[in-house]
Amino acid sequence: MDGSKKKKRKRKTNGSEVVEGFDVFKSSKSLKTKESKSNQEDDFVIHIKEIDKQIERDSQFRKKYGIHVSGYNVASPLWSFDELKTRFDCQSHLLHNITELRFKEPTPIQRQAIPILLSGRDCFACAPTGSGKTLAFLIPMLMKIKGAHEGVKGLIICPTRELAAQTTRECKKFAKGKKLYIKLMTKELSRSCNFEKIPCDILVSTPLRVDFAVFKRKLDLSRVEYLVLDESDKLFELGFVEQIDSVVKACSNPSIVRSLFSATLPESVEELARTIMHDAVRVIVGRKNSASVLVKQKLLFAGSEKGKLLALRQSFAESLNPPILVFVQSKERAKQLYKELALEDIKADVIHADLTQVQREDAVDNFRAGKTWVLIATDVVARGMDFKGINCVINYDFPESAAVYIHRIGRSGRAGRPGEAITLFTKEDKPFLRNIANVMKISGSEVPKWILALPKLKWKKHRPLRDYVGAELDDADE
Ligand SMILES: Nc1ncnc2c1ncn2[C@@H]1O[C@H](COP(=O)(O)OP(=O)(O)OP(=O)(O)O)[C@@H](O)[C@H]1O
């Protein structure tokens, strides 16, 4: 009995308990697995729904600010500068500097380009003149570069020395409170200095100077983590493109983040630029290659060189509302016009490539300080220069291309303020009017119908040989 009971019990124990136990275990596990699987699935569905909602919110938000993106998995735009802290753990000194400068809201290009760059993606960015592109590339750079003084980590290339100097100043303003070495590449620095001995975390330069320093083995760019090509379409033009190519090659860090910024980005440049970008996101604010809508644009027929000078004098006599920027097509013409206006009571100055660096800096500083009312300039200051509160840009000489027109008139109408642009034209400029008229129309300025009816012309560079500034009208020309 005992034995059989034992056996039974044993059987029970060995059989049903084990089996039961196994079953219980198995069934509870499978239940749990099923449960957790379905929980996981639920979580996944919720997660996907959240992502969908976020995508929808992002797209509504982008629409509101005229932001167009292409590329996959694009970072959500910034709703406010505070998100730099909550989403990206931005250091407090940078937020403090942004507040100090009274920047309340990010501009559209800042809303989108900053998170893209912070997520480590390459970026093409095209946004109107005066819309805050500089800060859009400076913030990610200042947030990411630690300042361990291990060589150049951030490199910003600008097409002109004036713009490089301005960008360096801006960069220092926003870096205040962080121990970062920010250097402007001067002629001396590129020729005589060994960067291994000079602390430099962020370097701002023109292409030629940085290329020269690399060529002379005075500058190692292999640690660069952030490369910015500002006014990128200009940098991809003949004359710069070879230097850019060698600088890009010298930035050999595989995890580098490259970005291109400009208000104009022709297809051809984009194609070329794509060869140096990796998995880039493209951001366009507003319409690509368009002028700022804040600038009221006018065309004025002046007949001849004499007529242009008269028109300019007349406009100054009627209402001189400085600061005014007057663009001409060459340094010779800048000198001629300056000679004509220097004796008048309008505090005019001139800037062109024949002046020394110090003279150029003085011209910019005096204009910024309000000591000069009218600055006569070549296209050396047409791009990127941020002269605060320019009321009027006068294209004394017709611009050589639509891009030059957009950049020149973009010196006014910046940071949300209104501006004005007047373009004088003569008979020889007429065939090219249509191209400017299109830009004007798209940005909301009125254009006479007869100009829009002119035949479309393939615009090669329009730089005619012009008579001496103020020359009498040649009767034969009429
Ligand atoms: N978030 C902001 N809020 C207010 N002002 C801003 C903001 N961001 C930049 N600015 C100001 O707007 C002005 C234009 O900025 P910035 O020079 O960066 O324009 P940009 O887009 O680079 O123009 P360009 O195409 O002519 O180079 C500057 O005076 C700058 O200080």
Image: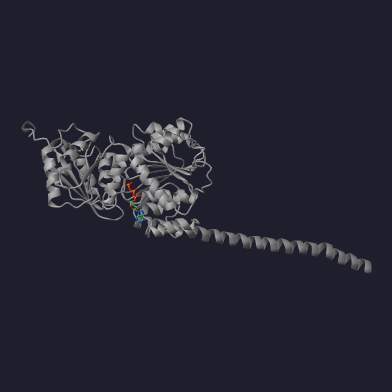
> Which quarter of the image is occupied by the C terminus?
top left
Task: Please say whether residue 113 is visible from this viewpoint.
Answer: no
Residue located 39% across and 56% down the image: 59
Q: In x, y percent, where is residue 10?
A: 87, 64
Residue 226 pos. (x, y %): 46, 44
Residue pictured at 21% horizontal, 36% vertical: 335
Quadrant assignment for the N terminus: bottom right
Q: Is residue 452 above or below residue 11?
A: above
Say above or below: 240 vs 439: above
Kindly indicate the quadrant of the structure image that contains residue 164: top left
Q: Is residue 428 visible?
A: yes
- Residue 40 left/right relative to 159: right
What is the number of callouts on the image?
A: 0
Percent coordinates x, y for residue 44 in the rendering: 54, 58
Identify which residue, 351 or 89, lies in the foreground: 351
Residue at point 15%, 40% (across, down): 340
Which of 463 and 58 lies nearest the eye of the viewer? 463
